[in-house]
Image (cartoon, rainbow, N blue to C red):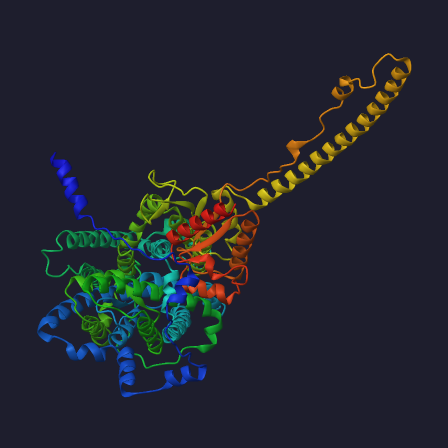
Amino acid sequence: MEHAQVDEVCLEQTQKYCVERPIYNQELLEGQLHRRERTPQTLRQKIAHSCRCSSKKAKSHLYSFLPILKWLPHYRVREYLLGDIISGISTGVMQLPQGLAYAMLAAVPPVFGLYSSFYPVFLYTFFGTSKHISIGTFAVISMMVGGVAVREVPDEIISVGYNSTNVTDTPEYYNDRDTKRVQVAVTLAFLTGIIQLCLGLLRFGFVAIYLTEPLVRGFTTAAAVHVFTSQLKYLLGIKTKRYSGPLSVVYSIAAVLSNITTTNITALVIGLTCIVLLFIGKEINLRFKKQLPVPIPMEIIVVIIGTGVSAGMNLNESYKVDVVGNIPQGLRPPAVPEMQLIPAIFVDAIAIAIVGFSMAVSMAKIFALKHGYTINGNQELIALGICNSVGSFFQSFSVTCSMSRSLVQESTGGKTQIAGTLSSIMVLLVIVAIGYLFEPLPQTVLAAIVMVNLKGMFKQFGDVAHFWRTSRIELAIWVVAFVASLFLGLDYGLLTAIAFAMITIIYRTQSPQYRILGQIPDTDIYCNVEEYEEVKEYPGIKIFQANASLYFANSESYTSALKKKTGVDPCAVLAARKKARKRHAREIKAANKLKKKAVLKLVNLTNDVEANVKHEIANDELPVNGKFASADASVPDTSPEEHEHFVEPKANIHSLILDFAPVNFVDSVGAKTLKSIIKEYKEIGVCVCIASCSGPVRNELTRLNFFDNTITRELLFHSIHDAVLACQVKDRSASQAD
């Protein structure tokens, strides 16, 4: 009883609406509405309007180009400064060892990693819109830069100019090789920045949407494998050449395994010890995150300990452990990049520009959503472009957002871009004053730092199980991005992954879901008849829906699915009618032939009867008025009444409604397909209507000359229910006329 009362109360609380209005097709609806008058602007007017300048417009553009002018005057010193100082110091402490380590990935001397951790970070303060991301060196971008540098300046080219049989051990060899690779890395940074700057000024920030999340995660996971394998030789203290291009991972692993017997045990022990210490530090920071005021800077602690041990025990000379080496004090004067290298590295610059922007904008969006502010994707492109292009004049290589440092900068209380500025100042102090102290730092320590920082990327292997449960297509994108980037190299792998992602989009539009809709009784709501038991179809009316646009790639499958789902194929019906007419014609011809034979037979019988009568009269055997029933009975009934009425095969429906609510666009092939559908079904007596067609799609159909004397806007209806009611009225009118 109580449940019944509750249900009754719920029913009383259910809101209802009842609207009484005419049945609207598009022509009737537009006849009752008044369009707003819009004066179209000429091209000259548009150009004049865009070039018109006012103080308000100039101020808006200036604030957009230099966001610091907008947020710095409103900086809350008491509320923000302490958090920014703590965050800046914490991030700067991470920036130092990562800058040195990632320079090794970029195939340039470690000091250039410090340059790349200062200039771009400082510039981003003025031009960036994100308050929390940390710009600077990043493993994936550094690996891509290193691949290009090694490809353009391989060891073989440098060794040609030396006569010694052991040229790779001479300081002159290393200096010459490193100088040329720095030129390549710097020019690549310049070109990357110019591409990003141009894309930002042209408002092309949307290009990042083509790097879907599964693609980026698969790509970065493969990049993590590349980075890990490239650091094995430093961890083991093995002398091998660096490989780039397709199958570079395979070649690197093979080179390490072939020289495994030359492993420097001292370097290996130091590297493994650093890895253990770093993992312990990260685990402590993770578990006691709320208790610790700031994360333990384990990376800089490891660097200081490693440098001290190396200097105290003279590891370089006593145990042949490779160290960082010369770190010149002070900043280098600006220099113009080598422009003649641009044609050889242009494609690589495009890949690095897009990947770098994608990394930065994805992290920026995460923090902006968390802290309730907005970022400008196009301005982020401009900011990255300026950081890379201007930084290249001061010998920095390509940079982007670092995920690990950004998380530290945000979690330690960073509020604005001031935190990034403070971290860059810390790097500047090292470059100017104390950089030489890190010269004894073993390279195996830097390799350990790089490897441990890959932990988050290696966790992305768990995406395979996640995408297997959620979306097989996204799993395919992840796998293709990973495998292609792993074996073809990061540049060709990225292009392959993007191409495959495009193919999946085409596949989805070519293979949409098709369904027949029915009505939920006593409502104007229409759902899939195969999904709900309550949904019922109207007799004689089929409602067809495809969740994709209608264009050249799927027009044929749209037509095939329409015929299959409705069970009505106009071609088959017309063929059946043609066959029935031919059969009917043959039956009539056979019946006429039979009738002709019967008439001839009747004439012959009549002649025979007359002859017999004359003979009997002559013999007086029968009266003149005798009856000849036998003659009448012998004449067959030749009237083929069953062939006089012919019934043609008909479709089991009288109306077909196409739901265009999911359709976003129609091209010329789609419009022709739609015309063909209407014409074919009209020939078999089925009226085709289009429901819920959006304004842009109607405009496209108009431009494509879809409407004419036979196909008018009366076939377009505002909703499915309008179309259903109109079809019912039309069918009743036709029945009464018959």
Task: Locate residue 651, reporting x and y percent.
Answer: 53, 42
Q: Is residue 274 above or below residue 185?
A: above
* Frontmost residue, 326 versus 654: 654
Quarter placement of the N terminus: top left
Image quarter for residue 60?
A: bottom left
Locate residue 411: give its quadrant. Answer: bottom left
Farthest residue in the top direction? 621
Numbered marks: total: 0
Q: Position of residue 439 (x, y in %)?
A: 26, 68
Q: Is residue 578 left or right of residue 418?
A: right
Q: Is residue 331 visible?
A: no
Q: Is residue 642 left or right of residue 4?
A: right
Asked whether the viewer can see residue 271, the reply is yes
Q: Is residue 103 above or below residue 715?
A: below
* Nearer the observer, 553 or 486: 553
Q: Nearer the viewer, residue 350 or 158?
A: 350
- Residue 558 place in picture, x, y as percent: 49, 50
Q: Position of residue 328 (x, y in %)?
A: 28, 75
Q: Residue at x 45, y 53 (%)?
A: 509
646 to the left or right of 542: right
> As drawn, is 424 to the left or to the right of 179?
left
Q: Is residue 327 or residue 711 the one in the foreground?
A: 711
